[in-house]
Image (spheres, rainbow, N blue to C red):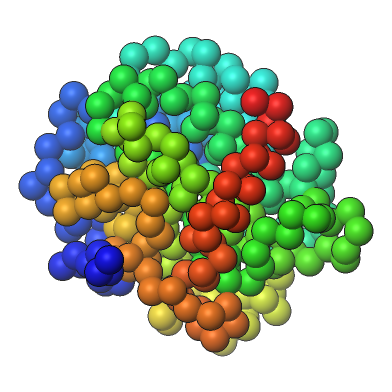
Amino acid sequence: MSRITTPFDARSTAGEVIAGVDLSGRRALVTGGSSGIGLVTARTLAQAGAQVTLAVRDTAAGERAAATIEAATGHEVDVTHLDLTDRSSVDALVSAWTGPLHILLNNAGVMALPERTLTPQGFEAQFAVNHLGHAALTLGLHGALASAGGARVVTVASSAHLMSPVVFDDIHFVNRPYDAWSAYGQSKTATILFTVALAKRWAADHITANALHPGGIMTNLQRHLDTDQLRFAGALSDSGERLEVPPGWKTPEQGAATSVLLAASPLVQGVSGHYFDDCNEAVVTEPGAHLSGVAAYALDQELAERLWEETVRLLGA
C-alpha cells in the first residue's frame, strides 16, 4: 500500500489544512483543550463551525479558553471536567454525554515526570494519563461515535514512542529502574498500538482512528523539564529565557495542523489505523536512528492485540 500524503507539510498551519471545510452540525470533544495545541485545535474546529466541548482538568482554565475561542470565532464552546487519572471522572463525562460525537480528539498528556508516580490504582502516571485514561474515555464513548456515522478518533502521540516499546512484563516500573523518557515513550507507543487495534475493531461502525506526532512545540507539556534538558533541546536563549518558538520547533498553529487534518480534512476521509507526522503518513524507521517516523513495533498487529487485551484488563472493562 502506498504511503498516504497530502499537499501539507511541517510548515502548514491548522487553519490552512482546514480551509474550505464546513463542520456545521458536527460535535467535537477535545481533551486538554485549555492551552497549547489543544486550544488551537479546538479554536480551529470551532472556526469551521463545529460544536466544540473542551474536556479539561482545570475547569476555570477551560472557561477562560472557551471565552477566547468564542471571542475569536463567534461560536459557543462548552467546558466539562475530565481528570484522566480518575476513572470516576471519565465515567461521569461518558454518562453525561448525550447524542452523537463526530470528532474525539485525545490531546491531553503529561511528559517526563521526574519521579515514578503511581495513580491510586497503581498505574504508572504517564501510562495512566496518556493511554489508559484516553482509552477508557474512547471506549466509553463508542455508542456516541457509532451513532455519528463516519466519526473520527484522533490521538496525539509523539516521536518519543521511538524511545521505548510497551514493556508488557513491567509496564509500571515495578521491577526495573524508572526512567522518565522510557515511561513517556512507552505510553505513547501504547496510544499508537491502541489506535491500530481500535481501527480494526470499529471499522464496521464506520469509525476511523489515527494517531500523530505534532512536532516540537513549546507548551505546558515541557513543565517538568529542568534547565539542562531545556538547554539541550535548544529551548533556552543565551540569557536562559525560554524561547516561545525555539529554532527548528513549530508554532502552536503548526503543531495543531496534523491533529486538525486527521479530525476534519476530506483528504483523509476513510483513512484509519495510521500514524502521521507533518500532515503526512509517517515512514517506518528504526528506533534510535531518527527523531521522526514510526517504529514498526508501534504498528504491529499482534502487539496491538496484546495491548488491547492488557488495556481492557487494567480498565476492568
Tell me: 145 left or right of 63: left
Residue 84's place in the image compared with 172, above or below, is above
Q: Residue at x 20, y 46 (%)?
A: 269
Residue 68 percent coordinates (x, y): 34, 38
Residue 177 percent coordinates (x, y): 88, 65
Residue 176's place in the image compared with 268, above or below, is below
Residue 116 percent coordinates (x, y): 83, 55
Q: Residue at x 68, y 49 (%)?
A: 127
Q: Quadrant of residue 66?
A: top left
Residue 42 visible in the picture = no
* Residue placed furthest toward the left: 20
Quadrant containing the C terminus is: top right
Tell how many labels. Answer: 0
Residue 61's place in the image compared with 210, above or below, is above
Tell me: 92 left or right of 294: right
Residue 94 percent coordinates (x, y): 51, 19
Quadrant containing the N terminus is: bottom left
Q: Residue at x 34, y 14 (%)?
A: 99
